[in-house]
Amino acid sequence: MRLFALAVAAALALPAVASAQALPAMPSLDETPGQRAARRAAMAPPVPQEDAALQAAVASETRSAEDRARDAFRHPFETLTFWGLRPGLTVVEIEPGRAGWWRNILEPYAAATGGTYVPVNRPLEGMGVADGTADMIVVARALHNWHRSDRTAPYMEAFFRALKPGGVLAIEQHRSAEGLNPDDTAPTGYVSESYVIHAARAAGFELDARSELNANPADDHDHPYGVWTLPPTRVSAPRANVATDRPTPLTEAERAEYDAVGESDRMTLRFRKPG
């Protein structure tokens, strides 16, 4: 049953072993919604893999009820399987945050399978591993912040140095529409898929696969207080000194409307360091 659920959930993802050359062409900046839907529909599902230790880490009651409630939007088992997580890997997570949503899965999984989990908050001060020794680097919902402070390029270069040849850079990121200036979208929490792909390729990575596991068509990317209007943050009133915020708070009806959207529309990408 788990294999079937994974196959259905990942129905628009590329094969887990796909090469960069096998990927469909990047969408043009003037891609229409219909063309985008057709491109996504043409993507074949990855080959599902059972991993009892990963299932146990995701289902563990050591994770908070709030964390587990978000699984419906973030698809941790399917996403980590798509990225290629397996026992015994050295996994570096960038900026895991105080809540540690991914950390609360990755760290116990590593402990149970003979792997190593390394949290890193300041990549330019050190990646926590020797150069060329990490198997996977996980980046979740961070590139909009890096763009605003010109950290994207140096961070990507640090990731490239830390990974083994063949190692995986795994990215989950709030996704804007194509053709928009990241200077405009990053303050609202979103950047385009092509922006992320270009940044990774500029550092030497190859795009290995991309998935629609975490897509949300109900997210129109246009919210009064950026992506933080949506769950789980649920900002409902203007924040001090945030110029992009609407100056008035949400009505009760608006709050219910944004809650119904769920979490953001996200890209899910897998890059490899050539080797």
Image (cartoon, helix red, strand yellow):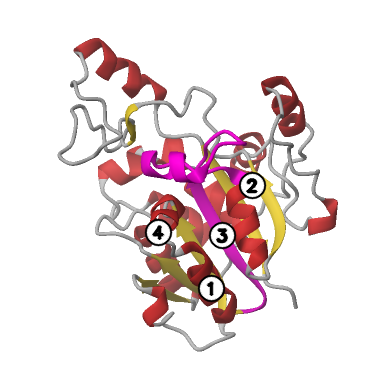
First in residue order: circle 4 vs circle 1:
4
Label pair 2/1, CB-CB below 8 angstroms:
no
Q: Name the residue located 54 percent from the left edge and 68 percent from the top edge.
A: 156
Q: Which residues are magenta?
A: 164-193
Vertical placement of residue 146 versus 239, above or below: below
The amino acid on which the numbered mark 3 sits, given as a three-letter code, is Ala
The amino acid on which the numbered mark 1 sits, given as a three-letter code, is Phe
Vertical placement of residue 184 versus 195, above or below: above
The amino acid on which the numbered mark 2 sits, given as a three-letter code, is Ser
First in residue order: circle 2 vs circle 4:
4
How far, Cα to Cα, is label 3 from label 2? 15 Å
Label placed on residue 170: 3
Residue at label 2? 194
Q: Name the residue located 32 percent from the left edge and 33 percent from the top edge.
A: 231
Q: Does residue 104 appear left or right of residue 43 in this picture?
A: left
Residue at label 4? 105
Q: Does residue 62 appear left or right of residue 189 in this picture?
A: left
Q: Quadrant of the C terminus?
A: bottom right
How far, Cα to Cα, is label 4 from label 1? 21 Å
Q: Position of residue 126 (x, y in %)?
A: 40, 82
Label placed on residue 258: none
The amino acid on which the numbered mark 4 sits, given as a three-letter code, is Ile
How far, Cα to Cα, is label 1 from label 3? 11 Å
Label pair 4/1, CB-CB below 8 angstroms:
no
First in residue order: circle 1 vs circle 3:
1
Q: Does residue 156 appear left or right of residue 241 in this picture?
A: right
For marks 2 and 4, give the one nearer the viewer: 2
Dot 3: element: strand
Q: Name the residue located 72 percent from the left edge and 20 percent from the top edge.
A: 34
Dot 2: element: helix
How far, Cα to Cα, is label 2 from label 1? 19 Å
